[in-house]
Amino acid sequence: MKVIPKVCSLKTDDGKFEFSASTKLQTSDDVMRLLLSDMLLSEGKENEVLFSDDTSLGDEDYRLSVGESVEIAASSQRGFLHGLATLKQLIFENLNDDKTKYAKNESISLKNKNRSENSPSVISKIPYCIIEDSPRFAYRGYMLDVSRHFFGVSTIKKILDALWLLKLNVFHLHLCDNQGFRLEIESLPKLHEIGSVRKQTRGDGVELKGFYTKSEIAEIIKYADERGIEVIPEIDMPGHTIAMLAAYPELSCTEKPIEVAERFGIVREILCAGKESVFEFLFKLLDEVAKLFPSKYIHIGGDEAPKYQWEECAACRNAVKKNGLRDMEDLQGYFTNRIIDHLKTLGKTAIVWNESLNSGILDESAVCQYWQDGKVPERVFAAADRGRKTIISKFSPYYLDYPYGMFSLKKTYLFEPLMDGMSTQGAKNIWGIESPLWTEYVPDEEKLFYQTFPRLIAVAESAWTKCEKDFDDFKMRLPLMQRMLDEISVAGASINESLPNPMKGMLKVAKFVVNAVDKEMIKSAINAKKVKETRRTE
Ligand code: ACM
Ligand code: ZN
């Protein structure tokens, strides 16, 4: 069986269930019906797919039994949805007479196929089997950065359809960054009015704008929820906040007017941590975000926050002294803890990027999302060891924005999230894994899907499957999932593109690096250095 993520417990038997246009889906749940709608289910009586409650099963577990009828047993809606995702794959894998087409990689459409034949035709013959399935990790996520490039609701819905098929259960929306603030905030309207517009991107002269209205967010959350997916919003702070500062410059240490960033990279300007008004502003913002998103979690970023301005700011220096802090790193800890305390009053728990551990004073309730390679794991592992919930999003090889020549499909697939050096106790606190897609160089849907798939399929298998991983076996199962993603207009890179030979891979990496190097920024840095040197010699 070619199911992805791989199922570890499978028993087969003689016989085949004939799935036809008149197979009856015994549920009144419209979304369940919708998820199989391209299989043309109607109200016939020939055979049926049954849904039964089994409270002995774990939260997301399911049992799929294919015999004279099909039965999906689960103890939760998510369990039923996972069973349905597997059933859909089995139907697709066992299409009645399309196997040759499929092998030739020709386009197949279930809808057209069925229309052209006598009804009720047998669509698929699924071998009798019993599948018992449950997830390895409770948290299985995908992050999309909608700040650097904005993606509308229709693209998000396609992504959510794919996440459902892959049994991923978290969609992390990175809603704001230096290059754009993408959420309607009624009480602080300049955030979306000013913060969502950038004049151009790296000198291209083309304005880029967009934000989600509240009703669009509600639509995304509903669509995700119907597919068993939780949407977690991220409001990154105190760094990555130029779009916020463009709208409300009084939030920075200098209060100097600034424009939504047109270039990429880490910048000096961040939120001031010494002014009470900044906290009041953030509390107001988070109150609105908390009302909009039902998730118990709000991501508050905390990554890449240079402290140059804090060092020079009287209010920040005063906050260090007044609160008995050692340094500016502690000030970030203090800042983050105040936000976390406010989130607690709203019944929410914070997720933070791993830099937030640097101060050593981070509140123990915060979940750590680990991304940085290098020395950081020791700190991350030690925190997990002491009981901190942790998500693994290690840059290499989970960052989907990097070329396949750097992180090939195989490298991503074979990465073991419970990394060497983690203690048994620490490993128990690994909540799950998540792959982010940062979109500096992802201007459109086509590139988004190209970077994301098939690597996210590999991540999904790592997140879900408990049994031994085998790349050749995964590769053999992969085309079926790729065809299914094609059917929902989520085409990704081909298997060959995702596994480039060393020469091709290196060329792609070189192209990526050349494109990422910002010549204008280098030029201005050289000029600034020259000016400084001239001044020194004067
Ligand atoms: C990050 O990549 N700055 C979380
Ligand atoms: Zn300050």
Image: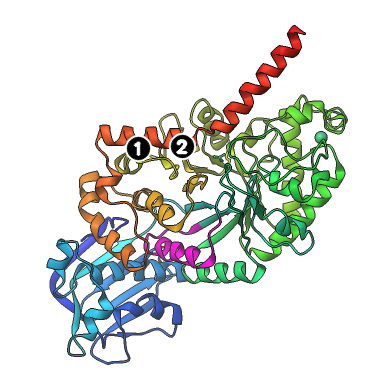
- Picture coordinates of residue 20, whole percent (x, y): 23, 83
| 159 inside magenta stretch | yes
Count the numbered circles shown.
2
The residue under the point 41% across, 70% down is: 81
Where residue 40 appears, x then y in whole percent? 30, 83
Mark positioned earlier in the residue sequence (1 or 2): 1
**Hey, what amino acid is under mark 1?**
Lys
Looking at the rendered image, the quarter that the N terminus falls into is bottom left
Relative placement, left or right, of 250 versus 471 is right
Label 1 secondary element: helix
411 relative to 202 in the view: left or right: left
Name the residue rendered at 42%, 37% in the picture. Answer: 512
* Residue 315, picture quadrant: top right
Q: Is residue 86 magenta?
A: no
Q: Which residues are magenta?
A: 150-170
Q: Residue at x 70, y 58 (%)?
A: 192
The quarter holding residue 419 reads top left
Identify the residue position indicated by label 2 in the image: 515
Look at the numbered disc 1 and say if its residue's Cβ is closer than 8 Å to ligand 1. Answer: no
Is residue 468 visible from the viewing direction of this image? no
Q: Residues within 10 Å of mark 2 (few under 14, many from 20)?
A: few
Going by the numbered disc 2, the residue's amino acid type is Asn
405 vs 35, nearest the viewer: 405
Quadrant assignment for the C terminus: top right
Q: How is the image coloured?
A: rainbow
Q: Which residue is mark 1?
A: 508
Locate residue 415, reporting x and y percent.
Answer: 36, 39
Q: Residues within 10 Å of mark 1 (few under 14, many from 20)?
A: some
Query: Looking at the image, which residue sits at the far top?
Result: 537
SS state under label 2 = helix
Q: Is residue 120 above or below residue 509?
A: below
